[in-house]
Amino acid sequence: MSAPISNARRDPDQVLADIADYVLNTDIPGSLAYDTARNCLIDTLGCGLEALEYPACRKLLGPIVPGTVVPHGAKVPGTQFQLDPVQAAFNIGAMIRWLDFNDTWLAAEWGHPSDNLGGILATADWLSRNAVAAGKPPLTMRDVLTGMIQAHEIQGCIALENSFNKVGLDHVVLVKVASTAVVSRMLGLSREEIINAISLAWVDGQSLRTYRHAPNTGSRKSWAAGDATSRAVRLALIARTGEMGYPTVLTAKTWGFYDVLFKGQPFRFQRPYGSYVMENVLFKISYPAEFHAQTAVECAMQLHGRLRTLGRKPEDISKITIRTHEACIRIIDKQGPLHNPADRDHCVQYMVAVPLLFGRLTAADYEDGVAADPRIDALRAKMTCVEDPAFTRDYHDPGKRSIANALTVEFSDGTALDEVVCEYPIGHKRRRAEGIPLLEAKFRTNLARVFPPRQQQRILAASLAQDTLEAMPVHEYVDLYVI
């Protein structure tokens, strides 16, 4: 007869305690993290504004019950919606992730840390409006930037050594955990209450990655992060009521996260929480493409120019070799029919074919009208992905974190173009000086999609000056985006 499992209540798992202590007690040193967070903020909001052009995104936005307006609720940028913070977080989160154009973090687990902005901004806006209504001071945008830095760090540091995709789970579990911790701190929860909230995030059944992979790739991948960050706000609010937590949610034998969902393995950590992730985050500046393909797209753009210069046509091509890293092959090396935009922006061959043919890659290029061009699939059929172990090593190297791709084009007459190699995409930290002006230009373009010129200028004046933005009350900044 087996011995009964002890029912003695234990101290919380160290992972939970470390996250709570980080959000409560860690000061962010220097200005680099805050400067980067401001650029991340404007880029993320701009991505959301661009998504408003797509009916498939817009149909998901608004209150759960049509016509509902929440007094002192959080507002949704680019719309007239004013919602409770949970639903506002879903709206903002779905917008910013819809086009796969916001920032990226690549490690053992990849993801998009700015996905957390949905919960952070909605909660900060809601708290600020209610504070002003009660005659109290509102939160400032520096509070939002601090929350972004912390959420980036939690999500990114867990991702460094722990692959959730290898056990079939989606990376949005880390959005939920990070958003829960930061939102709990913003709500004024105690250390114990924050630990309770974080435990609730791990208790949740986690999203399967099947909506990102053949044969089920679909649009849920565009709103999964909105779902996760809104769920985080809900769990933080539940914890605020005094609802209990589950201190060994990760380590409990048989019933804990490690045993049930992580093959019995504990999390591993490479570094303590600080501001490393925000300072090194990858921006998607030029192309709305899954990040493992960003450098492949840059290579394809160069090759498009060479083909035009030489007078060579796509039909002259007999073979295209994509020399790449293991993660690219595992995630976006895809043959066969592509059924929807979500399928296409997770296919490296599609993301190479379009710029080779047209000299561009935009969000509209994933839609059915462009995809119907038979030359795209004809080129896809000529492509082969080959792993380069050196590319894979540099991808995981903390000192490099490259996302390298190389393209070789061969022709039917036996000739070939010299291989084009790109190790670091335009959004990489190593290319910040080159990338930030383009990031600001992207933001201006996205503002112009929604707002008249005077409103664009007011947003730019508030957004491009670090001190001005940090001092601005959150609700006043969000009001700039109401149309």
Image (tube, grey):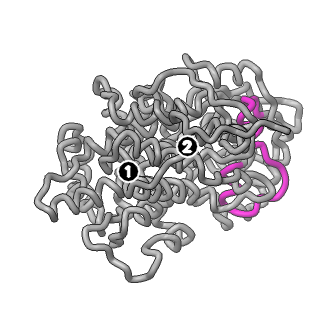
> Circle 2 sits in a helix, a strand or a loop, which is it?
helix
Identify the residue under disc 2: 174
Q: Nearer the viewer, residue 22 or 282?
A: 22
Which stretch appears magenta?
Answer: 322-346
Q: Nearer the viewer, residue 14 or 320?
A: 14
Residue found at x 33% / y 70%: 82
Q: Residue furthest bottom?
A: 67
Residue found at x 56% / y 21%: 270
Does residue 361 appear to the left or right of 165 in the view shown? Answer: left
Does residue 64 appear to the left or right of 265 in the view shown? Answer: left
- The quadrant of the picture occupied by the C terminus is bottom left
> Circle 1 sits in a helix, a strand or a loop, which is it?
helix
| Position of residue 340 measured from the top left corner of the image (x, y, whole percent) | 70, 63
Cα distance in 3D space between marks 1 and 2: 14 Å
Residue 120 numbered tag: 1
Give the amino acid type for the residue marked by disc 1 in the picture. Answer: Ile
Does residue 249 appear to the left or right of 48 in the view shown? Answer: right
| Position of residue 449 measured from the top left corner of the image (x, y, whole percent) | 39, 62
Which badge, 1 or 2, is on the more N-terminal residue?
1
Q: Is residue 147 magenta?
A: no
Q: Residues within 10 Å of mark 2 (few under 14, many from 20)?
A: many
Residue 419 visible to the viewer: yes
- The quadrant of the picture occupied by the N terminus is top right
Taking 414 as reference, is 374 above or below it? Answer: below
Residue 436 visible to the viewer: no
Give the amino acid type for the residue marked by disc 2 in the picture. Answer: Leu
Residue found at x 43% / y 66%: 87
